[in-house]
Amino acid sequence: MALSKDKAEATGTLVVPEPAEVVEPLVVPNTFWTSTSPDAYTGGHEPDHTHLREFEASGLGSRDNARWSGPLEIIPTKADYVLDLIRMNSLWPLLSGLACCAIEMMSTATSRNDLDRWGHFPFRASPRQADVLIVAGTLTTKMAGPLIRLWEQMPEPKWCVALGDCTCSGGRYKRSYSTVEGIDRVMPVDVYIPGCPPRPEGLMYGMMKLQQLVKQRRGHWPERAIGPTVPQDV
Amino acid sequence: MTTTQRPSADDPRILLDQEAGVFEPVPPYPPRTEREAEFYTLGDGEMFLNMGPQHPSTHGVLRVVLKIDGENVVDLDPVLGYLHRGVEKLAENADYHQVISQVDPLEYVSSLFNEWGAVLSFEKLLDVEVPRRAEYIRVLSAELNRIASHALFMGWMALDLGGLTPILWSFIERDEIVEMLASLTGQRMLFNYFRIGGVNGDLNHDFMSRLGNWMSRATEQIEANQGLLNENEIFVRRMRGLGPIDTKTALRMCFTGPNLRATGVPFDIRRAHPYSVYPELDFDIPTRVEGDCLARYLLRIDEVKQSLRIIDQCLHQMPDGPVIAKLPRLLRPRPGRAYAAVESPRGQYATYVVSDGTDQPFRMRIHDPSYIHLQSVGLLMKGNLIADTMAIMASLDPIMGGVDK
Amino acid sequence: MDRRFKTRLEAHFGDRLTGPVRQRHDQTEIRIRPGDVVPVMTELHDNPDLRFEFLADLCGVDTGEVMQSVYHLWSDTTPDWLRVIADGLSRDDPRVPSVTFLWPGAEWMEREAYDMFGMIFEGNRDLRRIYMPPEYTSFPLRKDFYLPDDAARSPGGGYRHMEQTHFPANTPSATVRRLPGSRQLPSVK
């Protein structure tokens, strides 16, 4: 449907397509996607659609891991404990509200259900300054790329919270042609908060669970799995 | 799969390559349309700035490519689709009863209007008579939702201009209303309350007591919230004269709702094409003539006051009776078409449903006001500064769930 | 239901209508040929007797055999909504003249109809995809674009014949409730 690039480069001018060239309706029968087939979740091949695995294997991501590295790692020190307490009580979320759950996230962050009590109030606009990515709202295939960029841009240590049914599993849009059925297909998730939309108390509970994870260093990056961890016959 | 064969672009599994998510403002293919060619041609001293799908403005995932000359925006091109969930297609595979819950998340801050538009069109298709008590409850809950939506608008308007306090205040108000509606409908946001032929459940004691408490202080609270912003010199000077639009252009751009009424046209679907029990209720249609951001903002505050009047009248005139008409579970309307429009806080929210005699709608078209209003952002933005982009978009009050369906 | 409106419409557009003027509840519907869209819309918009200056909605409909472009208009000369259906677009090459010369706000509505159906609006300056990514090749709301896990397994049963197509092979046909009188499923091999 797009014009060939050669034409534009050859003439050096802007090529405005004539009406006859605007579209060639290609109706592709939808044979790719039968979600009850065993290939559906992995597509018959590994989920290498992101390069998060190579990124992680290359060790670039763990360069600034903010841990005591080497042999000291196995000794939990008092400094470690204090560091974890500091981290868990000032997790700054990234302002990445996609859809309806964003309103509930905002509702949790504001006066009546105050997320500031746990230190989570500053919703940073820039991923470079954020700790937690609370994905609130349906992830569509078009938005998946930018969301993964956001995740990659966040520096370690970082955690991901899936807020709402659409991010946990696709939710009410599971059968749609343009949504991603759960963000754990594309990024590792630490806490799942179901609900459509979850009540602010639900989000608060989820954030408290996340704080426990942070404190116990359970949700750490190399051990988290990318991809759905739902067993095969579910 | 180790080959480099790229699956089809229609594969719903996402495909991320190196370029995914890195936004070159200029698309890599040659322009396909006249407008694209016009937009992606840089003049002297101009550059592109990409305001990506994630940005601190709270409207949602909207990507705007700005063509700027210094700090002035020369042109802008919104890119949508980051929240396109395929609701119209899913609606074709659902029953008439199920579809109502599908249209909730479109304009998620004013869900009851989405449901109302859908339910009204189904009732026209099925020739259903809605009991009067149900109509009054619908109007009551919908006007509460309108107030909640406008309270949110006020907060977002200020947030996009940089003020962090009003959003906290407006969320207090919104939380109260939303908890009220939760005691009535069971849900804080995507209510799923309207049914074909009525509503899901009658008013209950919890709702009435909360409503009474809130109504007794609603007016003072609105005055207090208003006083925070209306006399704030920075707010007023930034918004006055920003993004003006005149009546003729607004009609040609298919504006509806508060955006159209701010230009001087007193067009309100509740009066122009009345539905439900609005003919029996006494309220005014606020109109302003300036057509700029400040007019749109003040108009919505006026609408909140009118909504309070309507709620008051509903409470006094509430008749007794059933709250839902008796309908079979398997609904099969005659083949036909129906169009119903309601006045949502953003404008005309309409549903066009085509029925083919089966129990699923054949085509359900949802006309969303935010989608239409977002077209004119480019028109309103000419010559303004980058920081005003957000102000103008906020004043048009789009909700990306409705824009992207 | 405005009966006089019907006679007025027939007086203005008698020869251009391809069907009777239908009225139901508060809507009046006329059907025209796609080639007549420009003169009919201009007449509806400019004529001081009609004054349909407000375009409420523009959408596409895929009936399975043909496609339609449906316009909803509002005027203060009549209490009814006017629905104009430009009927008879072929499903292989649906082309309709655009109404953006009258209502520039129709541009995005036509873009959406193009994105979802493949309808080409001649005269629209910006006919490109709006919801789906630009490299997408199918048109999702067409009737031959099937959702996964499609309606064949819903309680409605996949009544329409276009939905009685291949469905996941491990669905036992006994569990799919069919409406009486509909075709049997292909047997699972």
Image (cartoon, coloured by chain):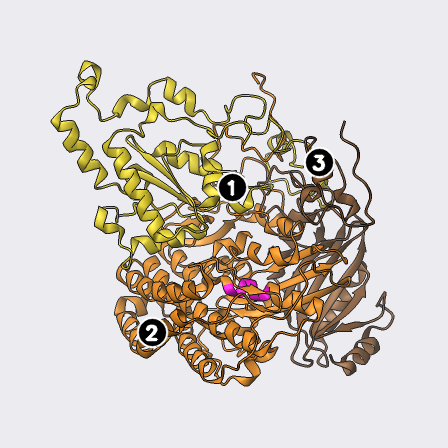
Chain colours: A yellow, B orange, C brown
- Chain of the residue under label 3: C
What number is the disc on residue A170? Answer: 1
User: What span is colored magenta in the figure?
Assistant: B112-117
Most common SS among magenta residues: helix
What number is the disc on residue C167? Answer: 3
The residue that disc 2 covers is B214
Percent position of residue C105, x then y: 59, 62
| B94 horizontally vs A182: left or right | right
Q: Residue at x 23, y 51 (%)?
A: A116
Percent position of residue C98, x then y: 70, 58
Q: Are marks 3 and 1 on the same chain?
A: no
| B64 horizontally vs A94: left or right | right
Disc 3 crowd, CA 10 A, few/some/many (<14, 14-19, 20+):
some
Please, what is the three-letter code of the amino acid marked with disc 1? Gly
Task: Between residue B28 and residue B155, name the one nearer to us.
Answer: B155
In which quadrant will I find the C terminus of chain A?
top right
Disc 2 crowd, CA 10 A, few/some/many (<14, 14-19, 20+):
some
Q: Is the Cβ of the residue at disc 2 closer than 8 Å to that at disc 1?
A: no
Q: Residue at x 50, y 51 (%)?
A: B78
Q: Quadrant of residue B249?
A: bottom right
| B183 horizontally vs B79: left or right | left
Does the magenta-highlighted stretch encompass residue B91? no
Q: Is the Cβ of the residue at disc 3 closer than 8 Å to that at disc 1?
A: no
Q: Secondary structure at mark 1?
A: loop
